[in-house]
Image: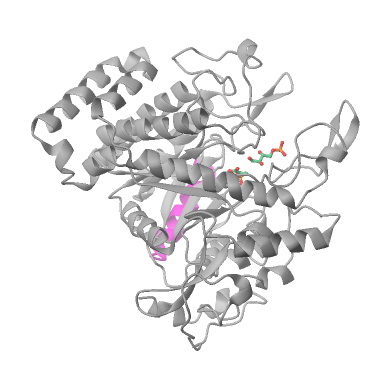
Amino acid sequence: MFPAFLAPVPLHRTLKGIQLRSRRSLTPCATLQSPQQSTPTAKPNWSPNTWRSRPILQQPVYPDSQALHNTEARLSQNPPLVFPGEIRRLRAALARASAGKAFVLQGGDCAESFDHFNAASLESTFRVLIAQSIVLSYLSGQPVLKIGRVAGQFAKPRSNDMEDTAVGSIPVYRGDIINSAAESKDARVPEPERLLRAYSQSAASLNMLRALAKSTQSMMEWVSLINRLTPEKYAALVTHIEDALNFVAACGLDTSASTEGLQNMREPEFYSSHEALLLTYEAALTRQSMTSSGHMSWYCSSAHMLWVGERTRQLEGAHVEFLRGIENPIGVKLGPTADPAEVLTMLDTLNPDNDPGKIMLIIRMGQDKLMDRLPALLRAVKQEGRHVVWSVDPMHGNTIKVNGVKTRPFGRVLGEVDAFFQAHAQEGTVPGGVHLEMTGEENVTECLGGDVNEVTEERLSENYKSMCDPRLNGAQSIEMAYEVGQRLRKFSRRK
Ligand SMILES: O=C[C@H](O)[C@H](O)COP(=O)(O)O
Ligand SMILES: C=C(OP(=O)(O)O)C(=O)O
């Protein structure tokens, strides 16, 4: 199934410290072994621990290393959160997206929280993601692949190690899996037991998301949710969506689940993802499993898809080293400084056999910089015949501060989406997805703008709950789906 793993990395891009690939012996063993029981890996010179000898950024320093070690040992015995078959299914779906036959919608919290965790909030985000996917599918005529930033999105990379607060300068909050957001020096001390709590919350979230995905909704229930959150300017489109759904229902197609798209609407396939930042957590949840062709492979069982962040994507760093050995699909965040040679080397390292469902390049350059920087990347990747899904994260490059509060104006976010489609039209490449920090909660006031119940500067403090960066609320998320869908529709018709 993966014979090309045996191919050597092109010499000119071989990384210092990563040896050329060579034939390796395969040792059969039971499926889903943990790192501590591991047999030789299918990837040469890699194990779930090789990252430990690489330079690493954005990691906490635990005062009690024995406690951390005990927690890692505990986690490595815990059951996997996701399974190899699901991961392989996601890769097959992503391969379709890389060929322009599906579109990826990836979204969820900036940072999941222990204190804000509740069923209503999780369910509202799930429902809004499905509603967005219906709008996107209707407008573009493409199946939409739904991936949540959920069930593991707990660790945050930060710009600075320290912050000034009312109690003086203290270490920054790095996400609930690491320390507490409370403003005191003690609260910011990293605590290993938080890894176990994050694991438990992720398991509970996945349990609920799997149940939600299986609980059949009538199409009209979706229409009523979409209707409530649709801006006036798109009211006519809701009627068209309703007509289309009525038509397929009248044809008996909604119950027969005879096409991928319709089945997806009734029983949506839903995948989890998060930034692979806290490598002690990710490594402890990495398991070995046999592929259908009898090869042993490593899967990170913390989420279906993982991504490497803009701040930790150094080619010789620990995060890329960890990610190169696992079979999960990998996202790579690319900010304005990413250059073509670096991106191609990254692809050599993470996807040496050029599998079309393996890599998602997630552009987050900011609306002002994208048109300057993205076309060169699109050209280089296309010229080299590399298969990737191109996605846009229009959130992270468009953050501003208003009265000291981080926010993102809806218009700027949309500006980056626009530029993304424009760059692909110019270069003849495929815009394959969108990545949003969002919540299904309707009354959240973190991002400015939006047509339904507009968030003004004065309203930002009304209900600002994000643990780190501002999210689109339920109505802003649906509005964004219309905007992205219109652009995707125009794009598809241009072909
Ligand atoms: O979500 C992304 C980063 O973690 C976040 O933007 C960092 O925020 P900071 O610049 O306030 O540290
Ligand atoms: C930190 C994030 O993004 P980036 O690495 O693009 O800044 C994120 O998506 O949470």
Q: Main secondary structure of the magenta part?
A: helix
Above or below, 471 against 70 in this view is above
Q: Residue at x 43, y 50 (%)?
A: 390
Q: Residue at x 65, y 47 (%)?
A: 197
Magenta highlight on residue 141: no
Give the camera-side residue of 12 and 188: 188
Does residue 178 appear to the left or right of 112 in the view shown? Answer: right
Residue at far left of view: 251
Q: Residue at x 66, y 73 (%)?
A: 50
Give the camera-side residue of 350 and 208: 208
Q: Quadrant of the N terminus?
A: bottom left
Figure quarter occupied by ligand 1 = top right
Q: Position of residue 208 (x, y in %)?
A: 45, 40
Above or below, 74 against 134 in this view is below
Quarter of the figure with residue 165? top right
Q: Which residues are magenta?
A: 371-385
Q: Quadrant of the C terminus?
A: top left
Above or below, 55 against 208 in this view is below
* Whether residue 458 can be seen here: yes
